Every structure is written in C-alpha cells, then in structure tokens.
Image: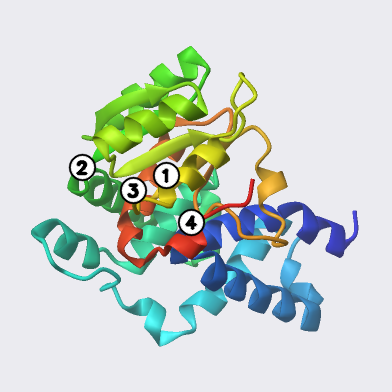
Amino acid sequence: MSSAQMVAHHLPYLRRYARALTGSQTSGDAYVAATLEAMIKEPSILGEAGKPKVALFRCFTAIWNSLPVNGASDLVEPDTPAERRLGQLTPQARQAFLLVSLEGFSEEDASEILDIDLARVRSLVEEAGRELAAEIATDVLIIEDETFIALDLEGLVESLGHHVVGIARTHGEAVQIAQKKRPGLILADIQLADGSSGLDAVNELLDTFEVPVIFITAYPERFLTGQRPEPAFLIAKPFQPATVSAVVSQALFFERNATRRERRIPA
C-alpha cells in the first residue's frame, strides 16, 4: 500500500479525533489539513512501516501542541463549579483520553503519539475520565430502534451519572419526547428500522432548541468525507463502553462552543 493510500485509510479517524478534540468540524479539519500539508512536504513523517496510523496522529499532535493557544486549559466559560473543574483539565489529559477511549489506541501507542511515558498516559486517562464523567450530569434522549442497543446505551449513560428521559424508536417518537422533556444531550442512530431517519429527527429538533448530539452508525466513514457539514460527534457500531463515555463527555464539554449551524446535518 502506498503512503497516500495509508493516509487515506486512516484519515476519517484522524478527522473524527480532531473534531472531538476541538469541538468543531471547521477547526478540526483545519488542523488535519495542516497535518496533510506537513506530510506532503516531508513524506518520511509516516515513520516505521507497520505504524502509519500512529505516525499520522503523532504528526497531528506535534502541530496541535506547537500553538500556544492549545496549551490553555480554560476552554469553557467558568459559570459553574463543574465548568471551572472542566476548564482546569489539561489539554494533554483530553488528548490521552480521546486517543485511548475514542480512537482505540493502546496505551503504548498513545505514549508514542503524545511523546510521553506510559505511566503518564495512564495517569492522564484516569484523570480525564474521572473529571469529565463525574462533572456534567444531564438528561439524555436515546433515538435507537434496536432494543438491546438502546438498553446498553441507557445503562452506559446512567452509569456516568446522567438520566435517560426516554428511548425513541422512530422520528415521530423522538420529536414528541424531546419537545416534552427538553434533553441536555441526544444519542441518535442515523438510520431507523421503520425507514425514518435519526438525522431528520435531530434536524427538526435543532430548529426549536439547542442541544449537543452524538450520532451512532455502523458506517462512520460515510459521514467523515469532508464534503459537507458532518456530525461533530460520532460513534461507530459496534461500540465500546469506553468510547461512549469519551464521546458523551467531550460532547457536553464543548456544548457551549457548538453552534446550530455546525450541528445541523444534511439528511
């Protein structure tokens, strides 16, 4: 496989990571573009054979960390004690947490990407998980037509301290529950079994009130092309509990900085 093919293979996942780290499709994609430009100028960045994904993320990390603004912890308006704690969470802890919990890197690979030792990676992941999961409790609406998956999601989000206000299996149910309960977070399957769309339901809801949304799909690569507005937060099926925890925490962390324009996804 050529270098270009290796990069193309891993690019959707770098874009997902960048978006989760920045909380914005526009900002995340800008860092990815800078990474690609660096690799075009210096193809040797891909590093040793067998670890192109690690090399790609390592290059991105070097660019991200090179800007002083990304070393600031205060990413959220400190209006509440919980937000003040989140604002104090170090950028490196967020990076380690996302690399291991969202992107599925081993702790050893995360250590190489971040250029820190293994013990430090473990400490950072524990720090981020403890802070993020414990400090942002909210009401959650789940839009999922597969019963067992819906129940798994319900158990996972409740174990993080959140409250599930309802499980919707169709577009109509989702709109009805959300308008009545006004959740603080939505977990939505993209394609529902009755032919309706989780995307349509979410877009209808976002016309009436602001809420962070996490989409769930068996085909994440279809929504990470860079050719149209995309979900800022995306979970691939089958999902791991740690992935759900990571993405829920990040979605709520960046909720204040998200805009309706960025959240609205074309069906």
Examine the rendered structure and indicate whether residue 247 appears above or below residue 8.
Answer: above
- Residue at the image point whose x is 59% and y is 33% from the top: 197
Which quadrant would residue 41 be assigned to in this image? bottom right
The disc, 3 or 4, on the residue closer to the chain's N-terminal end is 3
Determine whether label 4 and label 2 are within 8 Å by CB.
no
- Amino acid found under the numbered disc labelled 2: Ala
- Amino acid found under the numbered disc labelled 1: Leu
Q: Residues within 10 Å of mark 4 (few under 14, many from 20)?
A: many
The disc, 1 or 4, on the residue closer to the chain's N-terminal end is 1
Which x, y percent locates residue 89?
26, 63
Q: CA distance from mark 3 to mark 2?
A: 10 Å
In the picture of the structure, the residue carrying the numbered disc 3 is 249
Frontmost of labels 3 and 2 is: 2
Examine the rendered structure and indicate whether residue 164 appears above or below residue 222.
Answer: above
Frontmost of labels 2 and 1 is: 1
In the picture of the structure, the residue carrying the numbered disc 4 is 263
Q: CA distance from mark 3 to mark 1?
A: 21 Å
Which x, y percent locates residue 259?
42, 64
